[in-house]
Amino acid sequence: MPPSPLPVANPTASFWRSSPHPLDDYRSTSDVPSKVDIAIIGAGYAGVSTVHHILDICKCRGTAPPNIVILEARQACSGATGRNGGHLKPDPANRPSSLAVTYGVGIASECAAFEAQNLSAVKKTIEDESIDCEFVLTRAVDALMSDAICNKMKSGFDMLRKLGVSGIEDVHFAKGVDAERLSGVKGAKGCLSYSAGHLFPYKLILHLLSKAIDSGVNVQTHTPVTEVTKSPDAEGYFTLTTPRGLIRAKDIVYATNGYTSSLLSEFADKIVPVRGVCCHIKPTKNPAPFLPNSYMIRWSDTKYEYLIPRLDGSIIVGGARSEYYHELESWYNNVNDDLLIESAKHYFDGYMQRVFHGWEDSGAYTSQLWTGSE
Ligand SMILES: Cc1cc2nc3c(=O)[nH]c(=O)nc-3n(C[C@H](O)[C@H](O)[C@H](O)COP(=O)(O)OP(=O)(O)OC[C@H]3O[C@@H](n4cnc5c(N)ncnc54)[C@H](O)[C@@H]3O)c2cc1C
C-alpha cells in the first residue's frame, strides 16, 4: 500500500461547516514558530481534545503550560470531525459480542466500558465548560431489518448478558410489533436501545480551539506538514517541514487520522483512509414528525445507516455503503472528500419517507450531501 496523500483542497461542503467560525482560517502568527515543546498535527477531535487535556492537566497541577503549536493542513476542523454524522454512539452490543468470541469477556468488557465512559466524559466536558454545541443525551435505537440480523444481534445480546459484560445492563431488546412501535421504523424485526448522544461536532471543537488560543496555544491553519525527521537532533528536537517554514518540536502528536501514513510511511498498511457519505435532510412540512431517539438502521452486517435528529426538525444521516461498497476504489484508500461518491448520490432521496412511519407526507428532501475521509 502506498502512503496516504495529504488532505486535498476544496472539500465538499458539510452541513456542520455551513457557517464557518471566525477561527476557521486562523493563524496566531504570520510566521510559523521556529521552536515549540509540542507540535500537534491535525485540528479535529483528536488534536484539539489532546490540547484541551494538556492545558487542563497543567491547570490542575498549577504548572505553566508547554509551548504548543497546532498545525492543520486545511481549515480548522475540516477533516472527518467536521464532516461526520454527529453521533456519539457507544456500541455496547454488536462489537462486544464479536470481541467476546475472539478475545474473551475481559477485552469485550474493557472496550464496551471505554466507549460508554467516552460518552459521559464528552458530556461532562460540555457541561463543565458550558459549550454550546447542541449536545443531547438520548437513546440510540438500532432497528434490525431482517430476521438474520435480528437473530444474530439477539444471540449476541443473550451471550453478553450471560457473561455479564460491562454495559449490557443499559441495553434493551425488543422484537416484532414492539420493535416497530419502539423504533418507528417500518418493518423492523427487532431493535436494541441504549444510551447515546448527538451534537454539533464543529461547534464543540471550535469552542475548545478558541479556549486553547486564549491560553497561548499557537494555531496555524492551511499549514500542511510534509515531512518530519525520523529521530531527534542533539538537543532532542524533531524538525517538521511545512511550505511556510521549518518548526522544531520536542514532542509530536500525530492527530492525522487516515492521513497518518503520509508522514509515517510505516503505517501505510495499518492505517488506510476510507471515504464515507453523509447528508442533511430537511422536512418541508411544519411541524416535522418528531424523532425521539438517534438511530442505526441495520439491514445486514455491511449495510446500515446512522441517523441523528436535530432540534430544528432536520436530520443528519450517514451510510449508503451498500451503494458503493463493491466499488473498492470509490472508498478504500480514498481521500477525495472534494468529490461525492457517484453511486451514492441519490440514495438518501426519499429516505425518511421510505424508512420511518409518519414521514410519508413530510416533504423531506436531501438538502446537502458531502463526503469525508478517515
Ligand atoms: C462520513 C463520516 C461519518 C462519520 N460519522 C461519525 C459519527 O456519526 N459519529 C462518530 O463518532 N464518528 C463518525 N465518524 C468518524 C469520526 O468522524 C472520526 O473518527 C473522527 O472525526 C476522527 O477525528 P480525528 O481528529 O482523528 O481526525 P480528523 O477530524 O480527520 O482530523 C485530522 C486532521 O488532520 C489534518 N491533517 C492530516 N494530515 C495532515 C498533515 N500532514 N499536516 C497538517 N494537517 C494534517 C486533516 O486535515 C484533519 O483536519 C464519521 C466519519 C466519516 C468520514
Image (cartoon, helix red, strand yellow):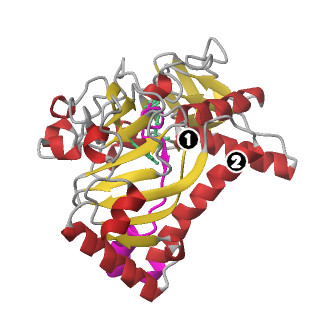
Position of 173 relative to 323 (above/below): below
Task: Tell me which residue sits at (56%, 40%) in the image.
Answer: 47
What's under tag 2, amino acid-wise?
Answer: Thr
Q: Which residue is mark 2?
A: 125
Q: Mark 2: which secondary structure?
A: helix
Q: Which mark is residue 158?
A: none
Q: Residue 254: where, in percent of width, then height?
A: 49, 42
Q: Earlier in the sequence, mark 2 or mark 1?
A: 2
**Alpha carbon distance from label 2 to label 1:** 13 Å
Position of 195 relative to 106 (above/below): above
- Quadrant the N terminus occupies: top left
Q: Magenta span has 89?
A: yes
Task: Tell me which residue sits at (44%, 63%) in the image.
Answer: 91
Q: Residue 159: where, in percent of width, then height?
A: 37, 84
What's under tag 1, amino acid-wise?
Answer: Leu
The foreground one among 248 and 351 is 351
Is 354 left, or right, of 237 in this rendering?
A: left
Position of 250 relative to 160 (above/below): above
Q: Residue 51: where, in percent of width, then height?
A: 65, 40
Q: Which residue is mark 1?
A: 199
Q: Residue 27: where, in percent of width, then height?
A: 61, 17
The foreground one among 204 and 272 is 204
Task: Tell me which residue sits at (47%, 37%) in the image.
Answer: 81
Q: Is residue 18 visible?
A: yes
Q: Magenta span has 41?
A: no
Is 288 left, or right, of 216 in this rendering?
A: left
Q: Is residue 275 visible?
A: no
- Quadrant the C terminus occupies: top left
Is 73 left, or right, of 64 in this rendering?
A: left
Question: Where does the magenta region start and end?
Answer: 79-107
